[in-house]
Amino acid sequence: MEQWDLWLGEKRVGTVSGRETGWGYTLLAVCPAEEGYIYRVALDRENENVLVAGVMLPQGQEFWLEKKMDGHFAPEKVRGAFILRSKPGEYTGFSPLPFPLEKFRPFALSHPPWEKSLLGSLMAHEKTKVCQYQDQWYAAAPLEKGLPFALAPFFQKVTPLEINGKLYGLVVCDEEGQVSLAHNVKEAREYWKGNQ
């Protein structure tokens, strides 16, 4: 039997196990239930290939997923498992966010760490959306075809993100204002490798 930790952002919330049967594998995922949210179990596989195994169902105070996988499923290629968390009707595929899109708010220049910085002034001008999650700020700036992007010196690499049908470039900023690429599958894989 194979077993992987189940992650929600950077928090371990449960486990996923794979048990071999005569014709394939049966996956079982279990974690605490969170009212008002849908949890989908995603398996991170080699070559940055993500397989969404299915939606977890409530069983008392827990979410469960039991899924029969065909004989082509290769558990040895699974690097880790994580939750794609969304509200009903919100899910559009893999998201690099550990929180729902509704938590984004318009950027206000009074927010640290940007209140007196050039980056803060540009984020206000570009109508950037932000969300503070744990000790990081997630910043999403609109990307519009054919228009200059004033944040390019700071947002050199971005993770694409769609919000209400518009494309945004997503980055993460720490309390010192250091900008980095938002968590993606590759970064999540590195995090799992270091925590196994």
Image: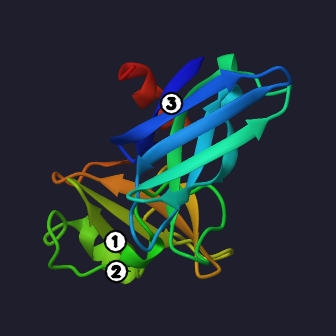
Q: Secondary structure at mark 1?
A: strand
Q: Is residue 128 above or below residue 158?
A: below
At horizontal 81% and vertical 25% (from top left) the residue drawn is 24
Q: Secondary structure at mark 2?
A: strand
Rendered location of residue 42, percent (x, y) = 60, 44
Residue 6 or residue 112, whichever sits in front:
6
Name the image quarter holding the N terminus.
top right
* Kind of residue sitting beneath label 1: Val
Rendered location of residue 38, percent (x, y) = 53, 65
Classify residue 74 by image quadrant.
top right
* Kind of residue sitting beneath label 2: Arg
Judging by the rendered image, the residue that carries numbered circle 2 is 105
* Kind of residue sitting beneath label 3: Arg
User: From where the camera sits, is residue 188 visible?
Assistant: yes
Judging by the rendered image, the residue that carries numbered circle 3 is 189
Q: CA distance from mark 2 to mark 3?
A: 29 Å
Q: Secondary structure at mark 3?
A: helix
Residue 120 or residue 62, whichever sits in front:
62
Q: Who comes first in sequence, dot 2 or dot 1? A: 2
Q: Is residue 171 above or below residue 18?
A: below
Classify residue 130 by image quadrant.
bottom left
Q: CA distance from mark 1 to mark 3?
A: 25 Å
Judging by the rendered image, the residue that carries numbered circle 1 is 130
At horizontal 32% and vertical 69% (from top left) the residue drawn is 131
Within 10 angstroms of label 1, few (less than 14), some, or many (20 or more) residues?
many
Decide if residue 120 is on the left or right side of residue 170: left
Q: CA distance from mark 2 to mark 1?
A: 5 Å
At horizontal 16% and vertical 63% (from top left) the residue drawn is 113
Residue 38 or residue 153, whichever sits in front:
38
Rendered location of residue 53, percent (x, y) = 68, 45
Rendered location of residue 117, percent (x, y) = 19, 66
Classify residue 120 by image quadrant.
bottom left
